[in-house]
Image (cartoon, coloured by chain):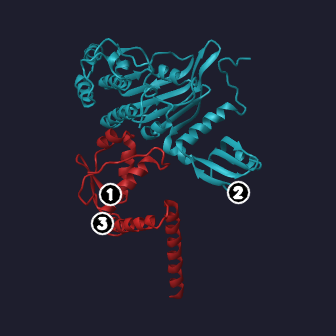
Amino acid sequence: MISFRVDGRSGVPPYLQVVRQVRQALRMGVLNVGDQLPSVREVVAAVAINPNTVLKAYRDLEREGLVEARSGQGTFVRALPPGPPPGTHSRLGHSLARWVREAREAGLDEESMESLLRITLRAADAADSESEEIA
Amino acid sequence: MSAAIDTHELTKRYRRVSALTDCTVTVPEGRVSALVGPNGAGKTTLLRILAGLASQTAGTASVLGGPPRQDPAFLAEVGFLAQEIPLYRRFTSEDHIRIGAHLNPSWDAALVRTRLAELRIPLDQRVGTLSGGQRAQVALTLTLAKRPRLLLLDEPVAALDPLARRNFLATLTAAVADAAGGLTVVLSSHLVIDLERVCDHLILLAGSQVQVSGDIDTLLAEHKILVGPRKDTAPIERAHQVVHTVTTARQSTLLVRLKGPVIDPAYQAEDVTLEEMVLGYMGADEAPAGKQLTTVGEES
């Protein structure tokens, strides 16, 4: 079972925050196929959000094919989202954490790390499209 | 789905002062509606009329299928929690549970005892000696014990600290979930951040009039902030409803309710938050365009 957080100041609609947290839990392997999502009652009693918000989020996840509502029983995970297998994120997260430690020791602050990541991503994109052109 | 609340041109005047003017709103059953507006906008007046505690000067109101009235059948289905928490301070929660059982035909005493136990609020303590947050919880739980179909809450969390507020709202949303569509709530508050979590419907009052009302997600999708160079905004005003404009020497920022796509490439359209939309409409009321408002102390 997972618990949700809803941040009122994030600018992301509450229902979308719930959807993203379920997807994230599926990717991280926190939730697996067959697992049950908390009931609407449990979610609203824990985080004080509108029950219709939770229903809307669960309906969205159902439309994506990730969960299924079984009448009288609750909502269960049906499939994992497309993408790398679960565990990939946490594995890469660990190696990224090593890199962050290294960067901090080298004197980089958060802003420089973020901009370095962005620059590297752009450079990788450019290299990809170049190799496509050559091919 | 049928409407829990349906008003048409509801008006309440005190002598020459209009507390509520031509208020036409619909709240579908099962929704949690946020009633917002500046102080003196008419929020309490509207709630009191809906609860059957005040009568209108003109217009009609239908609540749960009929006009609000002071009869036991109507009052059994409507819970009203006034701003000043209405409890007998020298009585304990247990006393209140017993009083409630005498006064209400369908009274769920077990619900109150279970919920207050969950919240670790002692039943045998005088409510006057409880904290503000605990008192608000006792009052809400007692109001829920009569299993209302409509709950009218007038700024119930205004005086509470953040944790007490969260707990109060959790009790409320859990009750809405338990009722599975059978409980409609109107909640007035200034705390938009709370309303954004808890509510899915909006009634915005300013200057005794309804400025905007409806499903929150739909309203947010219909409204945009347009940012562009300062120039003649007349074309935008012709195409859309301009709610609020902020103009600096170089730039115009407009809150608009869209009536179609924005075609002027000079403007960048951005999504709005509930708070921006609410503030935009409240600000719009300060300089009403072609609208004559009567407020206290401004009579000519």
Residue type, numbered disc 2: Ala
Q: Colour of chain B?
A: cyan
Q: Are marks 3 and 2 in contact (CB under 8 Å)?
A: no
Indicate the quadrant where residue B281 lies.
top right
Establish if B179 lies above or below B232: above
Which disc, if any, is residue A87?
A: 3
> Which residue sits at x=59%, y=52%?
B270
Q: Which residue is situated farthest in the bottom direction here?
A: A135
SS assignment at label 3: loop
- CA gap between label 1 and label 2 equals 41 Å
Task: From the image, state whether disc 3 or disc 2 is nearer to you.
Answer: 3
> Can the viewer see residue B64?
no
Residue highlighted by disc 1 = A25
Quadrant in which the N terminus of chain B appears: top left
- CA gap between label 3 and label 2 equals 46 Å
- CA gap between label 3 and label 1 equals 10 Å
Residue type, numbered disc 3: Gly
